Amino acid sequence: MSDLPHITVATVVERQGRFLMVKERAAGSIVYNQPAGHLENGESLIAAACRETLEETRWRVEVNALLGIYHYRSSANNITYIRHCFIAHALEEVPQASLDPDIIEAVWLSRDEIADLQSQHRSPIVMAAIDDFNQGISFPLTLIHGS
C-alpha cells in the first residue's frame, strides 16, 4: 500500500435547506457522505467534483466556490485523504444515469438529519463541511491554479 495521500473531491449541494448526500457501502458498512471520490489522472479538481456528483447522485451540478481543503487520516485503513470540498448548485437530475456500484441511493437531508446520522458518517469531514457551509465559509475558484 502506498504511503502517499489520496487526493479526493467532494461537493456540498444545498437546496431549500436540504443537502444532497449519498448512502453508500464502504468497508462493509452503510455510511453517509457528500458526493465524493478520487481525482483521476489528467482531470481538474472541478471536473472531478462534477463527475463524481453525477456518478453518485444522478445530479448535474455547477461548482461555484471552494468550501475548503480537509486533511483526514482514516483509522480504518490508515490512509491519509486530502479532500477538496466545493460548493455546487444543482442544475438537473439525470434519471437515466447509472449510479456507482457502491451507492445505495442519493438523498436530500436537512442539517439536523445529517447530524442525527453522525455515527454513520463516512468520516468526520462530512459534518465539518456541512457546518462550514452553514457558517458561510467559501473561497473563490480563482484560488485553484492549473488545469
Image (spheres, rainbow, N blue to C red):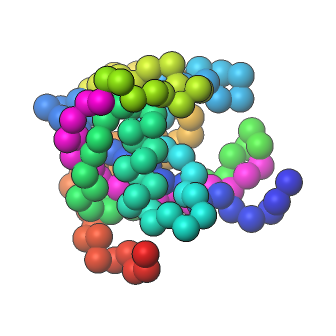
- Quadrant in which residue 30 is drawn: top right
The answer to whether residue 134 is visible is: no
Residue projecting furthest to the front: 96
Instruction: Tell me: 15 left or right of 50.
Output: left
The residue under the point 48% across, 24% down is 23
Residue segment shown in magenta: 78-94
The answer to whether residue 110 is visible is: yes
- The quadrant of the picture occupied by the N terminus is bottom right
The residue under the point 77% across, 43% down is 77
Residue 120 appears at what percent x and percent y?
54, 25
Camera-side residue of 81 and 98 = 98
**Image position of 39 with respect to 44: above or below:** above
Q: Is residue 79 magenta?
A: yes
Q: Is residue 10 magenta?
A: no
The residue under the point 54% across, 46% down is 37
Instruction: Tell me: 30 left or right of 2.
Output: left
